[in-house]
Amino acid sequence: MYLQMKLRHYDCVDCVTPCKSTSPNAVRCPKCAKVWEKERNRQNQRRRYQRLMAARAGRLIANRAAAVAVENSGIGETTMTIGTRSVLYGAHCAVLHPWFLAVAWSKLYGFPWDVRLWASFWLHDIGYISKPNMDGSEGETHVELGARIMGLLFGESWAAFTAAHSRYWAKRNGRQFSRLCVADKLAFVLTPAWLYLPMTRATGELSEYMLRAKERQAGSEHFTDYESARLNSADAREWLDGLKSYTRRWIEEHRNGGADNWTVGACVESTAAFH
């Protein structure tokens, strides 16, 4: 049995036109109902826009207040050094660089099945945190923290393996660079310019790297004329192209070990300009 809908008579609340409808909630004529619905939607959109603008303004105010607080407290200078920024979102970004390193290791030596290799991928650059420079006397000691952790976890051989991922540290300390060093260099080569350059610009690393590369190529006979010209360019993309060219050749020459006669002595002078 179907329920019979009763026809209800009423006057529109807006235009007072006599109307009839089967809906028990109808209070407006069809024409006035459309106008009312359109106005309600317009008001809802206005309120959403106002809430959005208020939220954005709140974030801007909060961010500015936080920035002022950091500047006045000196926190930025003590905790966000160039080394810390590098590990957070720069060339040694802890959430990106280990994956490039794993791909590089796979290309050179096969897939890294040993869990200790994965630990070294994640820990080898952790020592950059709090360092005031990347390639200066303080920055070159970044290998020590990761090496100590690897030593505690897996023994002295893995500590030495991790520490020797820096060819400059290995050269200065009379050590043989490790396979981790070779894979680390290939990881750099594999990192695309569209990712590497913005990250290193954001952290402030790029200017230091460009200066150090020029100093090091000046003391080495193993850079080609093409690479030297690129490394002396003021254009960051050209500089990166030259450094990657040199690094590829270094990898091919040293992927199976042997003496490293290409690497010049580490730079140990003050790097106050990069603080």
Image: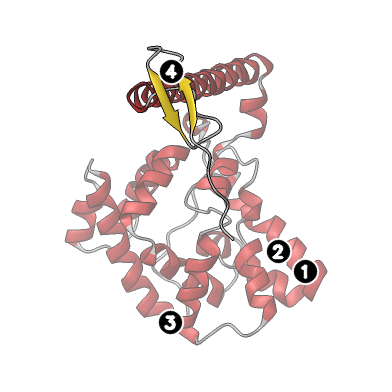
Q: Which label lies toward us, 4 or 2?
A: 4
Q: Which mark is residue 147?
A: 2
Alpha-carbon distance for marks 1 and 4? 84 Å
| Residues at circles 2 and 1 in contact by the CB criterion of under 8 Å | yes
The amino acid type, in three-letter code, at marker 1 is: Gly
The amino acid sitting under disc 4 is Cys
The residue under label 3 is 107
Q: Nearer the viewer, residue 19 or 60?
A: 19
In terms of depth relative to the viewer, which is nearer, 63 or 85?
Answer: 63
Residue ID at (77%, 73%)? 156
Residue at the spot 60% in from the left edge and 15% down from the top edge: 68
Q: Earlier in the sequence, mark 4 or mark 2?
A: 4
Would you name the residue on which mark 4 appears?
Answer: 12
Is residue 35 visible to us here? yes
Mark 1 and mark 3 lie on one chain; the one further toward the N terminus is 3
Quarter-wise, where is residue 222 in the image?
Answer: bottom left
Mark 1, residue position? 151
